Image (cartoon, helix red, strand yellow):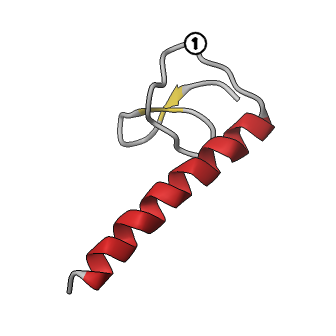
């Protein structure tokens, strides 16, 4: 998988990963899945924190 600009104009790689992505980056499907898992943990933490705050 190759880094690409998404419709929102953000450079992404894999399944929408944005941190540290540079033009020309290439990753495997396995690496893309690993990045997705890392991203999901962060998002879950953020959502849980917001839900508990209300």
In which quadrant will I find the C terminus? bottom left
Q: What is the tally of numbered marks visible in this picture?
A: 1
Q: In which quarter of the image is residue 42?
A: bottom left
Q: Position of residue 21 (x, y in %)?
A: 48, 24
At horizontal 60% and vertical 17% (from top left) the residue drawn is 25
Q: Is residue 5 above or below residue 33?
A: above
In which quadrant will I find the N terminus? top right
Residue hosting label 1: 24
Q: Where is residue 37 in the image (x, y as percent from the top left)?
A: 63, 53
Q: Is residue 43 left or right of residue 25?
A: left
Q: Is residue 48 left or right of residue 5?
A: left
At horizontal 27% and vertical 74% (from top left) the residue drawn is 50
Name the secondary structure under disc 1: loop
Q: Is residue 39 left or right of residue 45?
A: right
At horizontal 29% and vertical 83% (from top left) the residue drawn is 52
Q: Position of residue 32 (x, y in %)?
A: 68, 39
Q: In this view, does 50 lie above or below 20?
A: below
Q: Where is residue 20 in the image (x, y as percent from the top left)?
A: 45, 25
How crowded pointer 1 is (Cα within 10 Å; few <14, some 14-19, many 20+) is rated as few
Q: In this view, does 30 lie to the left or right of 23?
A: right
Front-lying residue, 50 or 22: 50
Q: Which residue lies furthest to the left in this view?
A: 54
Q: Is residue 21 above or below residue 24?
A: below
């Amino acid at each position: 998988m190759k880094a690409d600009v998404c419709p929102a104009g953000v450079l992404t790689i894999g399944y929408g990963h944005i941190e540290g992505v540079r033009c020309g980056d290439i990753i495997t499907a396995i690496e893309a899945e690993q990045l997705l898992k890392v991203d999901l943990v962060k998002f879950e933490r953020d959502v849980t924190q917001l839900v508990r705050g209300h």
